[in-house]
Image (cartoon, rainbow, N blue to C red):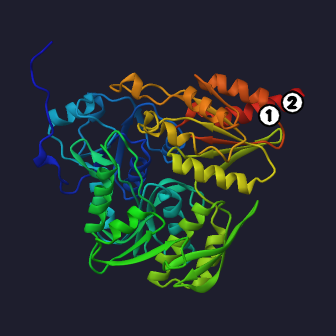
């Protein structure tokens, strides 16, 4: 083994070169990186990219837009030499492509740096942050702004149905960006949203997550405290005061704070909530006074809160209430957020990104209300660095009450984590069965599919909860149900 030290990135090269033409993206299939690739291509740059283990929808999206992705990382991906390299936060210091980047001495940036430099600086930045609801809230805000003919730009962590895209460059004043608290890059461990120059920010929630980068809840709170600290004095922070920690953090704000939630004492509150099969309706209270009725196809109380946050932003910038109400009702959602992937043999198959215990609970409660009278089967893949640890083991046992049956995939083990610190699908299944909820765990997707095709009946609803590709289980399940129907 050689004792030669590994090359390291020169901090002096963490900069933007003059007039770059060829930009290479390492980790291009990440949701944010894929959006940045699209923005850059739309702006006229030559784009190349590399990644490993790619999966839909981003891989499909990049292919549809003729952005070629090299599978796997290696020195050859930086030849011919690009003018600038964007390093995704999936890349580690010892990645062979990162080592070649250091050896070549090419200018490099993180994708939050690039987004801020090229796209946010000329606009008014509307940042949506929080542990939950960022993607749906961002998409809703961008869609309503577009419906109000304000021609926004946006970059969002999911494919927005109205645009069939997770980014666009508009001619209007506003840029909507999903503010992720995950770290920026291996050379910048601060949260992404610190680069986003917020003028108006939404803070949906603050809970513990991302156990791979945050040591404890205090570290999570500190990241959001930094976001509040960079808000300009003339900015506006719109915050869900249902969370005590959000109220605590907002007490530090120098800017204007607008509260929303379930208490009439807040600036925005809902009343007369009605969650139906096809529409959710609620009365809006502003400063305790009636401010109209609103309707949405999005089920669940959490989506009412997301809608109120958007209404507060739009009120702040002067959009007429009638336009807001019209566009909220027309909003069709985001892929992988309570998205109906299809119906076969009488079974509805839904795809959702939920993985944090709070998100799992809210999603299942919303779907149970929207599909009242039907049997709801939850299929859960713990895939994140947090969900594959046992930090949420007991919490998960309390959040599947909205489901009539639960199917859990045993997660792949995490490297460098002790066996006793891993999450156990078998332990969760036993805990749910002790509550009277039928539950099963399986080692792989094939076993789950085989079981579901035996056990599902017409009028069942299957909610697949995963933040990954999950072995393309949605399409494979629909195909299996279709074949089952043909055989019967």
Which mark identifies residue 329?
none
Residue 44 visible in the shown view: yes
Task: Indicate whether 460 appears above or below 315.
Answer: above
Rendered image quadrant of residue 259: bottom left
Label 2 crowd (10 A; few <14 / some 14-19 / many >=20): few
On the rendered structure, is 206 left or right of 359? left
Mark 1: few/some/many CA within 10 Å (<14, 14-19, 20+):
some
Q: Which residue lies furthest to the bottom in this view?
A: 289
Q: Pointer 2: what residue?
A: 486
Whether residue 35 is situated above or below residue 347 in the rendered picture: below
**In the image, residue 139 lies at what x, y percent?**
52, 62
Left or right of 207, for residue 464: right
Residue, far top: 1
Q: Distance between the residues labelled 1 and 2?
A: 6 Å
* Left or right of residue 382, residue 189 in this image: left
Q: Where is residue 352 in the image (x, y as percent from the top left)?
A: 59, 47
Q: Name the quadrant of the C terminus.
A: top right
The circle drawn on residue 482 is 1
Outermost residue, right direction? 488
User: As rendered, which of 291 and 358 lies closer to the eye?
Assistant: 358
Q: Are marks 1 and 2 in contact (CB under 8 Å)?
A: yes
Label 2: element kind:
helix
In the foreground, 87 or 126: 126
């Amino acid at each position: 083994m050689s004792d030669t030290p590994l090359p390291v990135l020169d901090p002096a090269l963490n900069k933007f070169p003059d007039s770059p033409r060829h930009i290479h993206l390492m980790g291009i299939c990440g949701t944010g990186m894929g959006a940045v690739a699209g923005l850059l291509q739309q702006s006229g740059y030559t784009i190349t990219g590399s990644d490993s283990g790619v999966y839909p929808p981003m891989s499909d999206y990049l292919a549809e837009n003729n952005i070629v992705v090299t599978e796997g990382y290696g020195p050859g991906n930086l030849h011919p030499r690009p003018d600038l390299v964007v390093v995704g936060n999936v890349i580690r210091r010892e990645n062979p492509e990162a080592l070649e980047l250091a050896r070549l001495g090419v200018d490099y940036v993180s994708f939050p740096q690039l987004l801020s430099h090229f796209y946010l600086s000329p606009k008014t930045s509307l940042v949506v942050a929080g542990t939950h609801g960022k993607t749906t809230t961002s998409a809703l805000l961008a869609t309503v702004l577009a419906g109000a003919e304000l021609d926004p730009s946006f970059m969002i962590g999911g494919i927005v149905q109205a645009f069939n895209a997770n980014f666009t460059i508009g001619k209007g004043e506003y840029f909507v960006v999903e503010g992720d608290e995950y770290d920026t890059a291996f050379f910048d461990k601060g949260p992404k949203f610190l680069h986003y120059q917020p003028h108006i920010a939404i803070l949906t929630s603050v809970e513990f997550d991302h156990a791979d980068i945050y040591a404890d809840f205090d570290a999570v709170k500190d990241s959001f405290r930094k976001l509040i600290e960079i808000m300009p004095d003339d900015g506006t922070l719109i915050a869900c005061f249902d969370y005590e920690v959000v109220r605590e953090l907002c007490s530090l704000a120098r800017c204007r704070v607008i509260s929303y939630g379930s208490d009439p004492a807040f600036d925005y509150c809902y009343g007369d909530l009605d969650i139906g099969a096809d529409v959710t309706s609620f009365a809006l209270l502003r400063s305790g006074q009636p401010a109209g009725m609103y309707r949405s196809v999005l089920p669940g109380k959490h989506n009412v809160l997301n809608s109120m946050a958007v209404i507060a932003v739009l009120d702040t910038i002067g959009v007429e209430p009638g336009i807001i109400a019209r566009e909220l009702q027309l909003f069709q959602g985001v892929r992988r957020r309570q998205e109906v992937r299809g119906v076969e043999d009488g079974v509805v198959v839904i795809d959702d990104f939920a993985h944090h215990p709070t998100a799992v609970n809210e999603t299942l409660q919303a779907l149970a209300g929207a599909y009242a009278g039907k049997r709801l089967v939850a299929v859960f893949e713990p895939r994140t660095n947090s969900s594959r640890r046992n930090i949420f083991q007991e919490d998960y046992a309390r959040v599947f009450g909205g489901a009539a049956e639960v199917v859990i995939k045993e997660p792949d083990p995490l490297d460098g984590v002790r066996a006793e610190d891993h999450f156990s699908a078998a332990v969760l299944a036993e805990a749910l069965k002790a509550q009277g909820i039928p539950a099963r765990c399986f080692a792989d997707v094939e076993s789950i599919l085989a079981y579901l095709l035996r056990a599902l009946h017409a009028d069942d609803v299957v909610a697949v909860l995963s933040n990954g590709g999950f072995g393309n289980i949605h399409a494979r399940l629909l195909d299996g149900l279709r074949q089952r129907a043909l055989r019967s």
